[in-house]
């Protein structure tokens, strides 16, 4: 496996699917047949707003929004894998996003009949066989839905797909009663992970339908941001484990064991008269479950062991996302030491050796530098002072700066950085290598070296471009040890 590592928090993984029969016509004014019924999209851009900066025309981009891919998740379908939807005969006008799935953060139109997807395509016909990008938004997004701007990637001749999926209690509740249902339907004594299974249902939909929208089902890249990129990385592996395997308790964070999930589920439902009447309240205890069936192991262990499916991967982080940098609210050496002693526990001595602060002045300098180097890795979006903050890379990488102009008008430098970043991403989507296929046409992209077992590089993307060697082994070992010893919560 080749890992292309960058200092950005987007993960992309390639996979493969099948082909179906072509339809010839420009797609924004064509009714497209899907396995569930006919759909009609619309011309996405009302004006050719992008050609000045992007050098490509947006006039042919078609959008198909709010296409159902599975049945209503309410009533008898609650806490079950996505169920088949009844086909329709009348043409579905796919011109608006579907409702968000119920979560604590959902806003606007919310419904349990929420499993829908959206796609943007620049294909002239279904015979174009354009590569496909499946994007999974982060769980912490305010509305927790797929209202994303896919027109920019479509302009680069990539069919972009976004989708809604279940989360929180409706996506990850596990109880003994639900385990019994799972045993009866799948043969595995597990429950939870309905949100992950929703994502697999989208991949099935792509396999069966994307060719009619000009996409190539043999060239699908899956991508996500924040916690959701881990979910997609999980699906790139195989191997079923016993759900109560004690080894699962020692895997990395952001997942819970089957035993812990059942404890949460039983306690959560104890005050309810009927599980079918359970409402969505506190979502904090509901995460993907290491059940040995849907999720056989954790992200960190997959990276160490190597996934069963040998696919190229881009992963990274923004400079001001997180890590070993000091927090601006830690004003003195004592607070710095107390905080990190609690955070790193038995590894704290090693941490302080590698990341020392020998006095309040040094700590203040660390905080000042962290706040000032806003453009060292990515040109921070206008209108904010948090540097290259969480999610700030998405607009650049996915060619979506055009969608941000009202609130934070982008500069020429923003568009320049966006062109290069999008060039890498589109090359990777097309070929599995960010360096090849000519997606960037305004010169030569700086070569991005992979981590392939013999070399370890990280690519700096922003107002400075270039490869750097990965942190010293001791630093990497510290981080690996920290995540490796975390018990699921």
Image: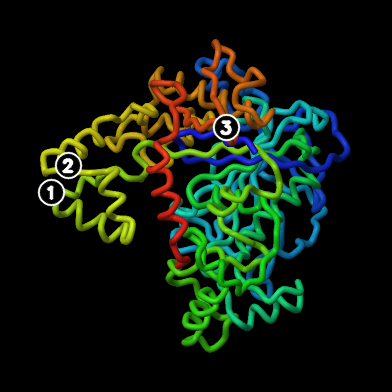
The CA distance from mark 1 to mark 3 is 41 Å
Q: Residue at x 39, y 28 (%)?
A: 378
- Which is more N-terminal, label 2 or label 1? 1
Tell me whether circle 1 and circle 2 mark residues in contact (CB < 8 Å): yes
Viewer-nearest of labels 1 and 3?
3
Can you see residue 173?
A: yes
Total number of numbered discs in the rendering: 3
Query: Compared to 343, does 19 lie above or below?
Result: above
Picture quadrant where residue 438 is located: top right
Query: Compared to 283, does 177 lie above or below?
Result: below
Residue highlighted by disc 1 = 332
Residue highlighted by disc 3 = 454
Residue highlighted by disc 2 = 363
- Residue 326 in the image: state x and y as whole percent: 25, 45
Picture quadrant where residue 470 is located: top left
Viewer-nearest of labels 2 and 3?
3
Q: Quadrant of the C terminus?
A: bottom left
Tell me whether circle 1 and circle 3 mark residues in contact (CB < 8 Å): no
Q: Residues within 10 Å of mark 1 (few under 14, many from 20)?
A: some
Left or right, residue 114 beside residue 365: right
Query: Compared to 161, does 267 lie above or below?
Result: below
Picture quadrant where residue 190 is located: bottom right
Left or right, residue 286 beside residue 123: left
Nearest the eye: 483 or 142: 483
The CA distance from mark 1 to mark 2 is 7 Å
- Residue 206 in the image: state x and y as whole percent: 74, 46
């Amino acid at each position: 496996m080749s890992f292309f590592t960058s200092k950005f928090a987007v993960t992309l993984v390639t996979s493969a699917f099948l082909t179906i029969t072509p339809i010839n016509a420009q797609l924004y004014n064509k009714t497209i047949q899907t396995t569930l019924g006919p759909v009609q999209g619309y011309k996405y851009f009302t004006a050719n707003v992008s050609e000045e900066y992007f050098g490509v025309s947006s006039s042919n981009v078609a959008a198909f929004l709010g296409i159902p891919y599975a049945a209503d998740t309410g009533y008898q379908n609650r806490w079950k894998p996505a169920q088949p939807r009844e086909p329709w005969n009348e043409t579905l006008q796919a011109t608006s996003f579907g409702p968000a799935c119920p979560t604590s953060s959902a806003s606007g139109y919310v419904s349990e009949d929420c499993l829908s997807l959206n796609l943007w395509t620049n294909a002239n016909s279904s015979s174009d066989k354009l590569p496909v990008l499946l994007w999974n938004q982060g769980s912490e997004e305010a509305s927790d839905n797929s209202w994303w701007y896919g027109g920019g990637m479509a302009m680069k001749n990539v069919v972009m797909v976004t989708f809604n999926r279940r989360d929180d209690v409706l996506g990850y509740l596990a109880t003994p009663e639900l385990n019994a249902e799972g045993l009866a339907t799948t043969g595995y004594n597990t429950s939870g992970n309905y949100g992950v299974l929703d994502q697999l249902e989208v991949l099935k939909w792509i396999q069966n339908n994307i060719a009619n929208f000009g996409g190539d089902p043999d060239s699908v890249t899956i991508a996500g941001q924040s916690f959701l990129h881990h979910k997609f990385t999980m699906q790139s592996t195989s191997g079923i484990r016993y759900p109560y395997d004690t080894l699962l308790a020692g895997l990395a964070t952001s997942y819970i064991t089957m035993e812990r999930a059942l404890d949460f589920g039983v306690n959560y439902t104890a005050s309810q008269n009927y599980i079918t009447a359970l409402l969505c309240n506190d979502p904090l205890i509901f995460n993907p479950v290491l059940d040995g069936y849907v999720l056989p192991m954790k992200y960190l262990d997959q990276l160490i062991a190597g996934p069963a499916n040998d696919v190229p991967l881009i992963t990274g982080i923004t400079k001001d996302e997180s890590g070993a940098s000091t927090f601006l609210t830690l004003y003195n050496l004592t607070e710095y030491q107390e905080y990190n002693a609690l955070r790193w526990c038995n590894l704290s001595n090693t941490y302080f050796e590698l990341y020392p602060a020998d006095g309040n002045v040094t700590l203040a300098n660390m905080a000042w530098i962290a706040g000032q180097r806003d453009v060292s890795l990515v040109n921070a979006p206008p209108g904010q002072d948090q540097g290259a903050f969480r999610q700030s890379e998405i607009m650049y990488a996915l060619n979506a700066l055009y969608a941000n102009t009202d609130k934070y008008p982008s500069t020429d430098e923003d568009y320049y950085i966006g062109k290069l970043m999008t060039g890498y991403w589109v090359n990777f989507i097309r070929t599995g290598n960010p360096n090849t296929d000519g997606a960037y046409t305004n010169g030569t992209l700086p070569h991005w070296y992979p981590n392939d077992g013999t070399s370890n590089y990280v690519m700096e993307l922003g107002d400075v471009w270039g490869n750097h060697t990965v942190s010293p082994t001791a630093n990497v070992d510290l981080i690996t040890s920290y995540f490796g010893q975390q018990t699921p919560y």
